[in-house]
Image (spheres, helix red, strand yellow):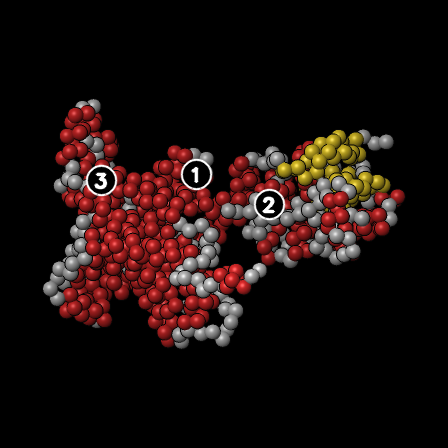
Amino acid sequence: MSAVLLALEGDDLGHGDQVVLPGLRLGLRHGERVALLGQSGAGKSTLLGELRHRLGEEAAWCPQQHGLVPGLAVYHNVYMGRLAEHSALANLWNLVRPLAEPWHQVAELCDALGLAGLMRRPVGQLSGGQRQRVAIARALYQQRSLFLGDEPVASVDPHQALRLLDLIDARHATSVIALHQRELALTHFDRVWGLRDGRLVIDAPASTLRLADLDALYPDAGGDSAEGEAGGDA
Amino acid sequence: MTGTELARRDTRPRWLSGQSTGLRLARHTLTLVALAVVLVPFADLAVVTRDPWSELAQMARGLAWPAWGTVESPLEALGLTVAVALWGTLGGLALGFPLALLFARSRLVRAGCAFVRAIHELFWALLFLQVFGLSAATALMALAIPYAGIFAKVFAEILEQIPAAPRDALPPGVSRLSRFIYAELPLAWTRLAAYTRYRFECALRASVLLGFVGLPTLGFQLETAFREGRYHEAGALLWLFYLLIASLPWWGHRRLIPLLAVGGLFLLAPWPEVSGSLLWRFVSQDIWPPALLAGDWHGVIDWLARIPDLGPAIGNTLLLGLLGSVGALLVALALWPLACRHFGNPATRLAGRGLLLFLRSTPELMLAFLFLLLLGPSLLPAWLALSLHNGALIAFLVARHADAITPGMPAASGVGRFAYELLPRVYPGMLALLYYRAEVILRETAILGMLGVATLGYYIDANFEYLLFDVAFFLLLITALLNIAVDALSRRLRPREVAVIDDPCQR
């Protein structure tokens, strides 16, 4: 078995005093690709936030709201992924005239992500799908071994989602990615974490799961089970 | 449920009773108006001049038939007005921007900014006049110092409101400066630029006003012409000023600013020779009571006893502030529909917009000056000027806000549309604007004293004239404290649940 990167052993996760995920137990191993599933509000972002906090500089991070700056060009938004590696002066100068090396590296990434020719365009003028790819480009540009993404392929078509996930896989050994496409979770990942009402109800290899197992994570989707039921088994 | 209970629940409500926002704000407003009505008898509102109407007719003729040829070197006065406004704003920006970054963290910075903001540009000019004389240095400092306080506060508010997502998305270990220039400044940029633009417009008005204390901007010739009854020349100068403001979008283009700034530098010369020792003497000795510097406490008490009774002046300042605010509210209520797309026809709207533009671009001191010539020295001209200028300003913003509203019942027109569709939607924002504006109105109240209205400003002006700098400075401190107190009070009284109209004029 490969090395454990991180283990939670009954930790309470939340924001300030408010506990969202009580008594959470899970482990993340090197080389594992994990899909994180659950309804909105189930605690996916809280869990990813905690992983990001614990893994620190090991993890590249692609947030749900993208966290892009609309007034800056695509190049500068991607460059922000490695802002900490340059001096403030170099960062300042980079706004005046892009530094040569980062410019070539970012151009390469943009080509791979179908953003070629858009590097000078302000992010505010891009479509939703393009912005999503800029956010991914920024995470890839960080060049870490581990990728954390909060719905990074939410607003692109299934075909493109596959391509993006392949790109992420090619550049990271380990990844934890929140998704809402259940089929993708089974076909493209090694392991599935399923959150429901603040509890980890699924933690199993993707090969042992069927789509029907995942349906249990979405009680509201079927329309036949009431919300109250969820509270009953807690 | 029994019949009687039903009947009781459905009783017709009495006058203005109920808990809806509209009714509560209506009661709030009526209380304000009632307070103003009760206090009006205490205000001196006498019309002193004998024949205001013929004077008004003469002024109107002057405005209608301006005598362009009589204006002496208009281009130089215009250029200097613009140069002072531009460099004053830039100076305020240079001082205020770093302070904005410290604003949230330092109580000292907040207090200092509140203090410099509370003193009007003209009073700063009077103060610096004693050190730098009638020079560009006086004019620039008079604008740059209060604007630094204003920029610090407004920029800090804008920076506080930027979305946090880009900041949170940054990898760990990013330095403070890098974070600021990548994930904070670009997000606030448009709003910062828009506010700076608005402040430059204010600076243009203030720059004209500096002529009233003797600096050779447009206001100097304007004041002289009016005072000496040369209304045709004054009319020409006023038109020049309106043209300057109205053409701002063209000559004030982003790309032209550096050119204007460099050209302005030449106009601002010659720079005064400032003697450091003189400046130091002024700051360390002249503006403080001698007894205080000597540590003689009995002397300080004697000094305080010799200051004329300030009760009536403070009373007048506060009274004028209240009356001015209520007047501005009534004027705004009456005028906003004139410029709003939901009422009237294109001709009336054009006229309405023109009227609002005229009233809000004329500096209130200028309006007060005109009314003073018409009506004689009392609180009345000041009250009219404050109400009209600030009312028109609020009306303009409210009309623009109302233009963006699509009525739910397009068939309703006239009064129905005003009272049911639009007023309930815009009134909360309008009242919030008024409370914002109350601080500005009070500041202006004080400077109207320079025209002879018996507010605190009157005594400040007089004491500067008698070279009693210690007394004048003491009165300035009192004025600033009064402003800060009223600002705190209006913050407290302001109705809470308001939909704020995006207001470029926030202070």
Front one among A135 and B164: B164
Q: Is residue A20 left or right of residue B191?
A: right
Does label 1 lie on the same chain as label 3?
yes
Which residue of the protein is positioned furthest toward the top in this rendering?
Answer: B295
Badge 3 amino acid: Leu
Q: Where residue B350 sits: x, y (%)?
A: 37, 71
Badge 2 amino acid: Ala
SS for callout 1:
helix
**Which numbered marker is on residue B475?**
3
Q: Give the spatial CA distance, label 2 vs label 1.
A: 22 Å
Badge 1 amino acid: Phe
Q: Where residue A106 sits: x, y (%)?
A: 66, 46
Does label 1 lie on the same chain as label 2?
yes
Count of numbered circles in the view: 3
Please identify the quadrant where the N terminus of chain B is shown: bottom right
Q: Quadrant of residue A205?
A: top right
SS for callout 3:
helix
Q: Which residue is mark 1?
A: B103
Instruction: Tell me the chain of label 3.
Output: B
Q: Give the spatial CA distance, label 3 vs label 1.
A: 27 Å
Q: Earlier in the sequence, mark 3 or mark 1?
A: 1
User: Which residue is found at the position 30% from the left and 58% from the top?
Assistant: B327
| Foreground disc of the pair 3, 1 | 3
* Residue count near mark 1 (Cα–Cα under 10 Å), binned few <14, some 14–19, many ≥20: many
Q: Quadrant of residue B416?
A: bottom left
* Residue count near mark 2 (Cα–Cα under 10 Å), binned few <14, some 14–19, many ≥20: some
Q: Which residue is mark 2?
A: B165
Q: Earlier in the sequence, mark 2 or mark 1?
A: 1
